[in-house]
Image: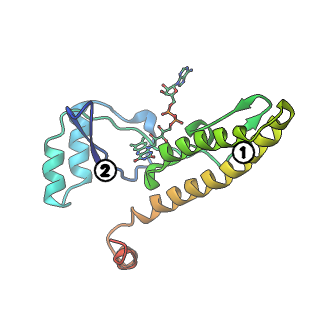
C-alpha cells in the first residue's frame, strides 16, 4: 500500500507480512528495520525493491483485530469506529466503517421525535452496525490469510481464482 502524506511531502509505504514473534521484542532501530525489511522482501518485484531502497524512516507495528462486539451502546455511552470494531487493514475499510457509523447514528437520531425514543433509535443503530462491522472484521481476517500464502499449489490456485478480478 502506498500513498502520499504530509501535504504531498512524504510518500508512505505500507508493507504487511506475517510475523508471529513477540512485538515487545521488536527493535524500532532504523538500520535493523531496514535490513529486516530488505530480507523479508528479497526476490520480490524489482520495482518494490527499488522503493524499499529509497525508504528514509521506518516504523514497524503489530496488527490486531478486536473480537466481535456484542454491545456498542450502554445507556448514554455509544462507542464508534475502531474503539468498537478494530479490524486488520486487509479490506482497507476501518476508516470507511467509522465514517459509516457516524452517518448511521445521525440517521437513527434524526427519526427521534421524543426523548423516550432515543434508546430504541440507539438499539437499532447498534444492531445494524454490529452486523455490518463484524462482517468487515471477518473479511479482513480472511484476507489476512489469503494474501500471505507461501509460493506453491495453494498460492497458485488463489492467483487463478483472483485472476478475473484483476
Ligand atoms: C496501515 C493502515 C492502513 C489503513 N488503511 C485504511 C484504508 O485504506 N481505508 C480505511 O478505510 N481505513 C484504513 N485504515 C484504518 C483506519 O485508519 C482506522 O480504522 C480509522 O482511523 C479509525 O478511526 P477512529 O476515529 O475510530 O480511530 P482513530 O483514528 O484511532 O482516532 C482515535 C483518536 O483518539 C485519540 N485518543 C486516544 N485516546 C485518547 C484520550 N484518552 N483522550 C483524547 N484522545 C484520545 C487518538 O489520538 C486518535 O486521534 C488503515 C489503518 C492502518 C493502520
The spot of residue 20 in percent (x, y) is 45, 49
What is the residue that sits farthest to the front in this orientation? 113
The spot of residue 59 in percent (x, y) is 32, 35
Asked if disc 2 is less than 8 Å from ligand 1, the answer is yes
Name the front one of labels 1 and 2: 1
Front residue of 105/47: it is: 105
**Cα distance between the residues tagged 1 and 2:** 32 Å
Q: Is residue 159 above or below residue 37?
A: below
Position of 155 with respect to 11 (left or right) is: right
**Residue 45 can be seen, yes or no:** yes
The numbered disc on residue 126 is 1
The numbered disc on residue 44 is none
What is the residue that sits farthest to the right in this orientation? 116
Asked if disc 1 is less than 8 Å from ligand 1, the answer is no
**Secondary element type, mark 2:** loop
Identity of the residue drawn at 40% across and 78% down: 161
Identity of the residue drawn at 44% across and 38% down: 23
The quadrant in which residue 105 appears is top right
The numbered disc on residue 1 is 2
The spot of residue 150 in percent (x, y) is 35, 67
Identity of the residue drawn at 34% across and 76% down: 163
Amino acid at each position: 500500500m502506498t500513498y502520499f502524506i504530509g501535504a504531498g511531502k512524504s510518500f508512505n509505504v505500507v508493507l504487511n507480512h506475517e510475523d508471529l514473534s513477540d512485538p515487545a521484542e521488536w527493535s524500532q532501530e532504523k538500520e535493523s528495520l531496514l535490513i529486516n525489511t530488505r530480507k523479508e522482501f528479497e526476490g520480490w518485484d524489482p520495482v518494490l525493491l527499488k522503493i524499499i531502497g529509497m525508504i528514509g524512516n521506518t516504523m514497524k507495528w503489530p496488527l490486531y483485530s478486536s473480537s466481535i462486539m456484542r454491545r456498542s451502546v450502554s445507556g448514554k455511552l455509544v462507542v464508534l469506529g475502531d474503539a468498537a470494531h478494530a479490524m486488520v487493514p486487509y479490506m482497507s475499510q476501518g476508516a470507511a466503517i467509522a465514517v459509516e457509523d457516524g452517518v448511521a447514528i445521525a440517521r437513527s437520531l434524526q427519526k427521534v421525535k421524543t426523548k423516550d425514543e432515543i434508546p430504541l433509535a440507539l438499539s437499532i443503530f447498534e444492531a445494524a452496525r454490529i452486523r455490518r462491522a463484524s462482517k468487515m472484521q471477518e473479511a479482513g481476517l480472511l484476507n489476512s490469510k489469503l494474501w500471505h500464502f507461501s509460493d506453491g499449489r495453494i498460492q497458485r490456485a488463489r492467483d487463478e481464482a483472483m485472476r478475473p478480478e484483476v
